[in-house]
Image (cartoon, rainbow, N blue to C red):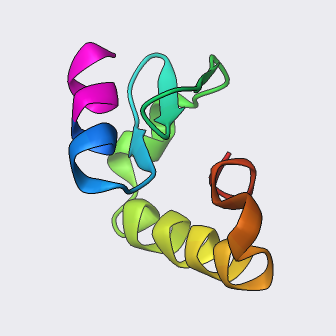
Amino acid sequence: MEHAKSLAKASGAIVAVSGVVDIVTNGLQVVSARNGVAMMQRIKETGCSTTTLIVVFVVVDPLHALEATV
């Protein structure tokens, strides 16, 4: 979590990290979710699909990029 926060602060970007607990941070706020599905690791392109959805949400509401990413 600290690495994600540090990267977000240094880059000015929203950072999302997936794992057992997914983390999204802007460097100041951190949102975590424990709703992963183990099978997603075995399906190709889920990361690309998820990233595409995040981009769409952020484009719709860029002033709330953290919430859009979550």
- Residue 5 in the image: state x and y as whole percent: 34, 27
Q: Is residue 32 left or right of residue 40?
A: right
Quarter of the view holding residue 63: bottom right
Q: Is residue 1 left or right of residue 28?
A: left
Residue 66 is covered by the magenta coloring: no
Nearer-the-camera pick, 35 or 64: 64
Q: Main secondary structure of the magenta part?
A: helix
Q: Is residue 57 left or right of residue 10?
A: right
Determine the residue positioned at 57% across, 31% down: 37
- Residue 8 in the image: state x and y as whole percent: 33, 42
Q: Is residue 49 left or right of residue 18?
A: right
Q: Is residue 53 above or below residue 29?
A: below
Q: Which residues are magenta?
A: 1-6
Q: Is residue 58 above or below residue 17?
A: below
Quarter of the view holding residue 60: bottom right
Determine the residue positioned at 79% across, 74% down: 61
Determine the residue positioned at 67% across, 24% down: 35
